[in-house]
Image (cartoon, grey):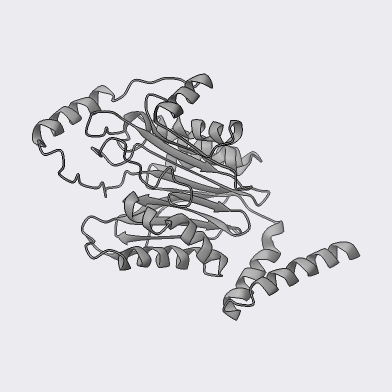
Amino acid sequence: MENNKRRRFLKLGLAGAALSFIDPFKASKLIASTENRLTSSPVVISTWNHGIAANKAAWEVLSNGGNALDAVESGVRVTEADVSNRSVGIGGMPDRSGHVTLDACIMDENSNCGSVGCLEGIEHPISVARAVMEKTQHVMLVGDGAKQFALDQGFQKIKTPIPEVKAEYQKWKKENKDLFKKPEINHENHDTIGMLALDANGNLSGACTTSGWAYKLPGRLGDSPIIGAGLFVDNEVGAACATGLGEAIIRIAGSHTVVELMRQGYTPQEACKMAVERIISKHKDLTNLQCCFLALDKNGNVGSFSVYNGFNYAYTSADKEALIDAPFDRNW
């Protein structure tokens, strides 16, 4: 017992020393957070209304004592398999050449991470990303290399675009002869799914998966497969994910920025808002520039914020299940 007290004293002492350059009030909040980490109630959150179904699958894992990594993979696989979804997985929209290319990344409590980009013809890119993390020395595989790796690992092939999407593409192609015309960013309620989970052991993990910007230039990668942009997890502090215009999110290393702000003592809500404000400050033209952040700290506290109205997220815990509208900076 005496040794346990001494270890706890040393832990808090080191935490206090590390926070000596931070505002005292914020430091006290973060030290209190460190004290409370020994007990956790599972929480899972995910972007947009398609997160409701995804959360159900993730919660089944968490509520049965499963870990956060298995939960987030299971959750976003639901969205990847939804043929009605036009921005994630099988039902995703193609690039300008008619190819549906999928991007995904995953990150666990030990900072292990895996990612795939421009992956075509494979059913579950998130699971391929996890295989990259667990079975290779790499973090990211892209294009033909990612596909060959997936096939070597026994992942199932799919044929894309599906007929409905192919018909939409053919119509778009006839109406858009200028291949250099900037496509419109999708700011409606169906975009990338990012998911964050905290399990009963107090460990965090996250996943992010998308088919990307509809009618993008072939080879384009957004923020979703990039660790630190579309997703970042630091088990000492918290986790964050992003959705919206990936190019703007990449420019500020968005999810990493949110987590580092939480490390400085800001709440998840404050951190998400500050990241959005940073994006706004770096763009003279905000037309159609929707960017959104979602964050979860070590104690299960949640935050969200977006440039424009319209962003929402699914929240699930033992005593609450809800679709929550995120605060925002401005109206469309």
Taking the image as shown, residue 114 lies to the left or right of residue 179, namely: right
Q: Nearer the viewer, residue 193 or 252?
A: 252
Q: Residue furthest bottom?
A: 24
Q: Position of residue 22 (x, y in %)?
A: 58, 76
Taking the image as shown, residue 85 lies to the left or right of residue 62, namely: left
Q: Position of residue 147 (x, y in %)?
A: 43, 25
Residue for point 24% across, 28% down: 98
Seen in the picture, residue 189 relative to 9 is either above or below; the reply is above
Q: Residue furthest right?
A: 2
Q: Position of residue 191 (x, y in %)?
A: 33, 44
Residue for point 60% across, 30% down: 135
Residue for point 40% across, 37% down: 103
What number of labels is visible? Answer: 0
Residue for point 15% across, 34% down: 172
- Quadrant hosting residue 289: bottom left
Q: Nearer the viewer, residue 2 or 144?
A: 144
- Can residue 123 be seen here? The reply is no
Q: Position of residue 199 (x, y in %)?
A: 62, 47
- Can residue 159 be seen here? The reply is yes
Q: Nearer the viewer, residue 82 or 128?
A: 128
**Quarter of the rendering occupied by the N terminus:** bottom right
Seen in the picture, residue 116 relative to 276 is either above or below; the reply is above
Seen in the picture, residue 247 relative to 156 is either above or below; the reply is below
**Quarter of the rendering occupied by the C terminus:** bottom left
